[in-house]
Image (cartoon, rainbow, N blue to C red):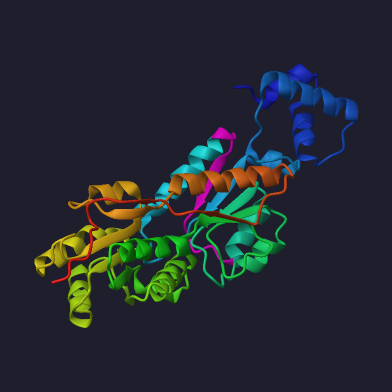
C-alpha cells in the first residue's frame, strides 16, 4: 500500500507539500498540485478520511444512525445494517455505525467532523425532532422510514400501511370476521415510531372496509400468554390474528395452543416479519416479508445518486409481498 512518502518521491516534492495539496491548508502552485494528483493516481494512494475531507473530497464513509432504543428488535435492525454495509462496499464506501440516541446535537457533531459523506437514518418517528436539521444540512441523507411529512427529504421503506392491509384482506378472503393485531411493545407507539403506526393504520382501515371487528394490542415480547388470554376473554369469537412483533411469534402460537386453539384449524395467524423467521415457527406463518436487504440497498443507492448530483424521488415505498404458509385457513363455522 502506497504511503504519503511514496507519493512525495514520485511527485518530486516533500511529504508536507503532499499534505498541503490534500488539505488545502497552504497554497501551492497548480503545476505542483497536478504532479501530486498524478502521483496519487499512479500509485493508487488512498489518503485517510480526515485528509480527504479537509480537501473537500469524499471520505468514502457513510454514517448509519440506528439508535438502539427500548422496544426495538435488534436482530431485525441488524439485517438492515448488514445490507447497508454490504451495498456500501460495492460503491467503495465504509459505514460508520451510530447506535446512541443521536438527536440534533449528535447529527450536528457527526456532520461537523467532515468524516462522512452522507447519512442514513433509521427508527424514524412521525414527528421526528431530527427532521428540521436533516432538511437544513448540506450533507445528503436518506431516511429508512416515513415521517408524517416527507417533504424535502428522501425516504425509503416497506409500505407498512399496505402490509397491514394485506394481512387483514387475506384473512377476510378466508372468511374471518373477528381479528386482532398483536403489535410492537408499548414504548414503540409512545414514541410514534412511523412503521408501527403505519401498520396500525393499515390494519384498522382494512378491517373497517371489510366490515370486520378488530382490536389492537401493543405487547411486550415476554407477554405472549397474557395477551392471548386477554384476546380470548375480550373477543371470544376471535379467529384471525396479525402479529407485528418478531420475538413474540412462536411464543404466541404456543400460548394459543395451550389455551385450546389449534393453528390454523381454530385460529389463523399472519405476520409482518422476515421470511426466515416466519418459516422457522413450528407452524410456518403466512407473512408479509420484511425486505431488509432491498431497503438497505435502496437507501445506499439513493445516497450514491445524491452524492453524484442526480435527482432522486423523495419517496420510495416497496409494495408488500405476502407468502401463504400453513398458519392460515378458512374460518370454520360451528
Looking at the image, which residue is at 60% across and 65% down?
105
Residue 80 in the image, given as x and y percentages of width and height: 45, 49
Residue 67 lies, in percent from the top left, at 47, 60
Queried whether the magenta region covers residue 230, the answer comes back as no
Does 236 sit above or below residue 298? below
- Tell me where the magenta segment starts and ends, as one range: 90-103
Residue at position x 35%, y 68% in the image: 184
**Which quarter shows the C terminus?**
bottom left
- What's the residue at 89%, 30% (across, down)? 30
Confirm whether the magenta stretch covers residue 98: yes
Counting from the top left corner in percent of width and height, residue 93 is at 58, 38
Residue 240 rendering spot, x and y as whole percentages: 26, 67
Q: Is residue 269 above or below residue 215?
A: above
**Total labels drawn:** 0
Quarter of the N terminus within the rendering = top right
What is the quadrant of residue 293 in the picture? Answer: top left
Whether residue 18 sits left or right of residue 186 in the image: it is right
Residue lying furthest bottom: 234
Residue 116 seen in the current view: no
Q: Is residue 158 left or right of residue 221?
A: right
176 or 102: nearer the viewer: 176
The residue at the point 10 percent across, 66 percent down is 258
Amino acid at each position: 500500500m502506497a504511503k504519503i512518502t511514496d507519493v512525495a518521491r514520485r511527485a518530486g516534492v516533500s511529504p508536507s507539500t503532499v499534505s498541503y495539496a490534500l488539505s488545502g491548508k497552504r497554497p501551492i502552485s497548480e503545476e505542483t498540485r497536478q504532479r501530486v494528483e498524478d502521483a496519487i493516481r499512479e500509485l493508487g494512494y488512498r489518503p485517510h478520511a480526515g485528509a480527504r475531507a479537509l480537501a473537500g473530497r469524499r471520505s468514502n464513509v457513510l454514517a448509519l444512525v440506528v439508535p438502539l432504543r427500548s422496544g426495538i428488535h435488534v436482530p431485525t435492525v441488524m439485517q438492515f445494517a448488514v445490507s447497508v454495509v454490504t451495498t456500501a462496499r460495492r460503491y467503495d464506501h465504509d459505514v460508520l455505525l451510530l447506535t446512541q440516541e443521536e438527536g440534533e446535537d449528535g447529527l450536528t457533531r457527526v456532520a461537523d467532523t467532515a468524516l462522512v459523506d452522507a447519512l442514513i437514518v433509521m427508527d424514524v418517528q412521525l414527528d421526528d425532532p431530527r427532521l428540521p436539521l436533516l432538511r437544513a444540512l448540506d450533507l445528503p441523507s436518506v431516511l429508512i422510514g416515513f415521517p408524517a411529512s416527507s417533504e424535502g427529504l428522501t425516504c425509503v421503506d416497506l409500505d407498512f400501511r399496505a402490509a397491514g392491509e394485506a394481512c387483514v384482506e387475506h384473512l377476510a378472503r378466508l372468511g374471518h370476521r373477528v381479528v386482532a393485531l398483536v403489535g410492537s411493545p408499548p414504548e414503540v407507539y409512545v414514541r410514534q415510531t412511523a412503521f408501527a403506526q403505519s401498520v396500525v393504520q393499515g390494519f384498522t382501515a382494512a378491517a373497517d372496509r371489510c366490515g370486520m371487528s378488530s382490536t389492537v394490542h401493543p405487547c411486550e415480547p415476554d407477554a405472549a400468554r397474557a395477551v392471548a388470554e386477554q384476546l380470548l376473554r375480550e373477543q371470544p369469537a376471535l379467529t384471525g390474528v396479525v402479529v407485528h412483533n418478531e420475538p413474540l411469534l412462536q411464543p404466541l402460537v404456543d400460548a394459543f395452543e395451550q389455551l385450546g386453539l389449534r393453528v390454523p384449524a381454530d385460529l389463523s395467524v399472519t405476520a409482518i416479519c422476515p421470511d426466515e423467521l416466519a418459516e422457522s415457527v413450528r407452524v410456518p406463518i403466512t407473512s408479509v416479508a420484511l425486505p431488509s436487504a432491498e431497503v438497505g440497498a435502496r437507501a445506499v443507492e439513493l445516497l450514491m445518486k445524491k452524492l453524484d448530483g442526480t435527482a432522486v424521488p423523495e419517496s420510495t415505498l416497496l409494495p408488500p409481498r405476502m407468502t401463504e404458509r400453513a398458519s392460515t385457513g378458512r374460518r370454520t363455522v360451528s
